[in-house]
Image: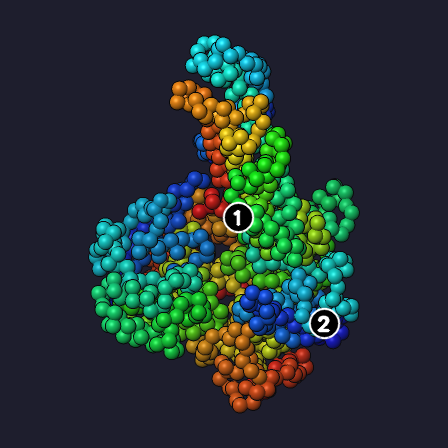
Amino acid sequence: MSQSTGKSILEVKDLRTYFYTRDGVVRSVDGVSFSISEGETLAIVGESGCGKSVTSLSLLRLIPSPPGKIVSGSILFHGKDLLSLSDEEMRDIRGDKISMIFQEPMTSLNPVLTIGRQISEVLELHRHCTKDEARTRILELLKLVNISEPERRIDEYPHQLSGGMRQRIMIAMALACDPEILIADEPTTALDVTIQAQILNLMRELRDRTRAAIILITHDLGVVAEMAQRVVVMYAGRKVEEASVFDLFAKPMHPYTLGLLNSMPRLDDASTKRLVEIPGMVPSMKTEIIGCAFAPRCSVASEKCTQESPVLKNHGNGHWVSCWHPISAAGVMHE
Amino acid sequence: MSKNKKVLLELNNLCKHYPIRKGLLSKIAGYVYAVDGVSFSIYEGETLGLVGESGCGKSTVGRTILRLLDPTAGEILWRGERIDELSRAEMRPFRKEIQAVFQDPYSSLNPRMRAADIVSEPLRNFENLTQAEGRERVKELFALVGLRPDQMLRYPHEFSGGQRQRLGIARALSVKPKLIMCDEPVSALDVSVQAQVINLLGDLQKEFGVSYLFIAHDLAVVKHISHRIAVMYLGRVVELAETAELFACPSHPYTEALLSAVPIPDPTRQRQQIVLGGDVPSPINRPSGCHFHTRCIYAQERCKREEPTLEEVSPGHFVACHFKLNT
Amino acid sequence: MINNNAMGAVSEPVQISKVRLFLSVQLPAMYKRYPFAVIGAATLLLMTFIAIFAPFLGTIDPQSVAPLNRLKPPSWANWFGTDALGRDVYSRVMYGARVSLVVGIAVALLSTVIGLSIGLVTGFIRWLDAIVMRIMDGLMSIPSILLAIALMALTKASIENVIIAITLAEVPRVVRLVRSLVLGLREQPYVEAAAASGTPLLKTLVRHILPNIAAPLLVQATYICASAMITEAILSFIGAGTPPNIPSWGNIMAESRSLFQIAGYLILFPSIFLSATVLAVNYLGDGLRDALDPRLSRRM
């Protein structure tokens, strides 16, 4: 596992991204803070609608505006606030210092351009390469991501490649300029399990080689366990827990995290007893949530939880929890 | 265990090939071998899990059993009677006994019909109930799946994904079927909701003794709910065994690779992962002999030439491989 | 009756008459959301009112000739002036509304019903589909106006024949729309689910397919109405449409073709009414299209 040097390169402080729709204001990201150090892999975990994808898009200022807007907060990249940069300065950063890979490789690649053309676009933009320099670099990149017959692939179109290969191309494009941070938004969700294993393996290899920091957005706790060093758990636009990956799985402190871990069927679990459910469903984001967002579904919720929003508290060793009644016993319990 | 139970459904060499037509005169240029010789049985009161990756044909098997598709070859026997060649009208009475729950909770319910009407559709097709009787039955069904009677007149878009899936289950249950084909019923749901639906399916099976053909790609879910599991690859069943047996001693190299590829939510586990090379071949141009030989780490000369057949290696455990592992 | 409408407003939990509810709460809400559609609907209602109550709106017999009074500009006696035969233009324009509305609505209805039937059949029966679509493609390759003219040349001039001719020209478009909708809907999981529930084919059509094509079909029907009104006017303008004795907006403009430089009001008033009506129908159609679009457009 690649070790992080501990120097924080990106600091997100109290980020708020709202969407102004006809039916109300959707507070997709409602006061989220975290930081990532050089070479570290941070996973942001949560279910659909929790705001993890919107967070990653906010980092690169890719929020469609209207209806969305980054309302407040700061994103400090090497001390400089990305939210205060001009569009041109931001464009320089995207793809060069911070790059992103998306969930659906088919729709994220331009179907009418060859693979070579698309990767060279990134290189021409940021590195000002000539066509030949670009071609050499592209072949290097394709070999780096284990694409067979790169000379042939460079002139092929996305539809001629499989899902796994397209995702590799996306990774190649993202790594073309040796970024410091790679944001991977559900990179393997749309892939088959065996292909997912290949891609995750590849990402681990590349991480060791390039020392890029990775922000991994996913809903799959198995992927988190395999890839991440630190984990942020999000619920309804807020951060509810943050810990090292070992602490999170061994000693989850937020009831939601515990609920998630208990409700997942697992391969390594011999029992076939009933899964422990989390009752109810994710709250609608269109109305403002007073108090803790998870309270309606929480088994340990109290009066205070419905009135006051819990604050993030450090429980030692970098384990932060936002809860009035965090769980202190160790381990994951079954019914 | 399954010897004393009655056989509900039996598949014998089921095939579904789609012709590919090209050119002005729509000549046949090839076939998509979606399902190519699948045989298994489902017993009363059990859940048979059907797993595989995209393109393996598991959904096609499910649809063909339900006669939403017509098989190209092979037999489908329901309680001993052949149903693979029946016309739409002849098939109707069997639909009371074989029902389905579909994958997408957003498009498997007619957006312009009220929840009560959606759930009672199979009922109305087969029984002549008065308005009051119908309403009572729907109320019962709603209660069974954990929905409130005041939601009966709502439209699908007013429900969440998990609730819609419950509606789909209520619909399937309405005619008290013996077998429900569940095609990826929880794949489109959030993790915290998946558990609710999985538990519901388990409870219903305990209460009514209904059998499930549980088609999914998520191995952990399938493991939790199935009594027996069949693993498919490129249109064929490569391994079939009781759940515990399959996970304890997988005998087919593909099963072994599949199991090792699933990420486990435990950061302390260091696993020896078998990472398969290459991509899943297309079901049009399949590799010769054993379809898996192009990616199999144990492949030999024989695998390229000869197609292995499904053989019983221990009671109830079938494998289609020339060099079975763990035996 | 508690009413949570789209804007989130909740009305008093008191018995309130439906009419008052509509006028005080729902109509303003609709106007706020789709202002043009409401204006369009109101204009259309106005035209319908004019068409029905033409005899009572201060008109005289539109066909009564008064040669001594011809080509008089608008005045208190003749609000829109008089034409070359001394007929009162205002009366003719008021009665002309009848023709346009009748033709527009009749064509919209007929072409929708015929197109729906054909489209449903072709969507489900593959071999019939191939034949029918070739015919439809053939018909669509002829510009609808020319097709209408050709059909009118074969028969005598009458409103019925005008309606039939324009309908025939518009049917292929409806067929195409219905067919593509049906083909798409057939693949929908809930249609599959209906088959799995044992629903026979005909019931599937009625219960599942029809309700889901009603909305796009309705929107298309409004556009056909607008298009038919214009086609009728054009046919009348070139003399191939409504018989000249019946006042229609196209006819009025046709008769005054050569005179419009000295008596512009002869063309002005019928064209204002025609444009306003067609615009109103188009706005209504746009509004319906936006309103009936599934909740996807409202969801984040």
Please name the residue that numbered disc 1 is placed on. Answer: C141
- The reply, left or right, for residue C204 in relation to residue A140 is right
Badge 1 and badge 2 in a common chain: no
Which secondary structure, mark 2?
strand
> In this figure, what is the number of numbered marks?
2
Q: Is residue A192 visible?
A: yes
**Residue B218, percent across and down?**
53, 67
**Residue B52, percent across and down?**
56, 71
Which subunit holds the residue at mark 1? C
Which secondary structure, mark 1?
loop
Dot 1 and dot 2 residues touching (CB under 8 Å): no
Name the residue at 74% across, 41% down. B132
Which subunit holds the residue at mark 2? B
**Residue B159, percent across and down?**
56, 47
Between residue A261 and residue B96, name the one nearer to us: B96
Identify the image quadrant of residue A110: bottom left
Query: Counting other residues with Cα less than 10 Å from the Cα at mark 1, is it few (<14), some (14-19), or many (20 or more)?
Result: few
In this picture, is A70 found above or below B274?
Answer: above
Please name the residue that numbered disc 2 is placed on. Answer: B75
Q: Is residue B169 visible?
A: no
Label 1 – label 2 distance at C-alpha: 49 Å
Identify the image quadrant of residue C170: top right
**Front label number (1 vs 2):** 1
Q: Amino acid at mark 2?
A: Glu
